[in-house]
Image (cartoon, grey):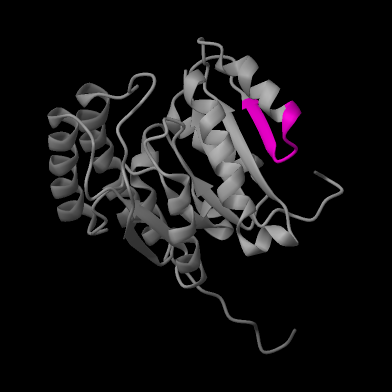
Amino acid sequence: MSNSPRPWASIVIPIKDERDNLPPLTEQLLKVLGSHERSRTTPFEILYIDDGSTDGSSQLLDNLAAQYPQIRVLHFDRNYGQTSAFDAGFRHAQGDLIVTLDGDLQFDPADILTLLPLAAQYDLVCGWRKDRHDNLVRKLSSRIAYGFRSAVLGDRIHDTGCSLKVFRREVVEKLQLFEGLHRFFPALAKMHGFTLTEVPVRHLPRAHGTSKYGIGNRLFKSLYDLIAVRWMKSRVLRYKTRPGDRQ
């Protein structure tokens, strides 16, 4: 893609054992993004980060990349987790806009088109799963985490766990991530003065595979990481410069 125009959008998708979801997800993404008016003149890219899959997803991803020029794949040598996958995706993404998404087909890729127009006004546009198809434990953990997060950080984003987001490039270039901080993208963006909003999106039942995250690695880790983000918020550097009288 080095000899091609810079992509107008990069879709960054962590993948951990999602073999059965990859073909339909890829097909839907190509259709949705290909229908956007900017794709008539400027390419887009789909960047899959293989987070140590062991179910055959790795080979399937390489096959998809060989079949479709819009697809690139990064392979981790083992499982490192979502934050590492997003960080690697951000560092390799070439688009002016960065769209994040899970690979479990619980989001409708068509909702990307709902978020995109708001990226002209906001630096970060977050999806909000108002009607969630999750079990009681995951719903309860999300509500508890929202209450604590809003009280401590004041980001007022209902669903930071929703992976469907659209970032302007300058946002991801500013983020410095540590393990677990993908759950705090809105707070981290706001910390640096970026603007954000949220938009209701559809949430679908999982058709294939199993969730990789439960109450043990969602609720308690999130609350623990909240302390670190609160500290970062209180210590973030905020300064402006002006030119001198003589240049």
Is residue 18 placed above or below 5 in the rendered structure? above
Residue at the image point whose x is 64% and y is 52% from the top: 34
Query: Does residue 232 show up magenta in the picture?
Result: no
Q: Horizontal placement of 110 versus 210: left or right?
A: right
Residue at the image point whose x is 69% and y is 21% from the top: 63
User: Quarter holding the C terminus?
Assistant: bottom right
Q: What stretch is highlighted in magenta?
A: 66-74
Residue 234 picture quarter: bottom left
Residue 207 percent location from the top left of the image:
36, 25
Is residue 204 placed above or below 74 in the rendered structure? below
**Front-most of 33 and 229?**
33
Residue 208 percent location from the top left of the image:
39, 21
Residue 15 percent location from the top left of the image:
50, 26
Residue at the image point whose x is 52% and y is 34% from the top: 25
Q: Horizontal placement of 146 versus 98: left or right?
A: left
Is residue 238 placed above or below 31 in the rendered structure? below
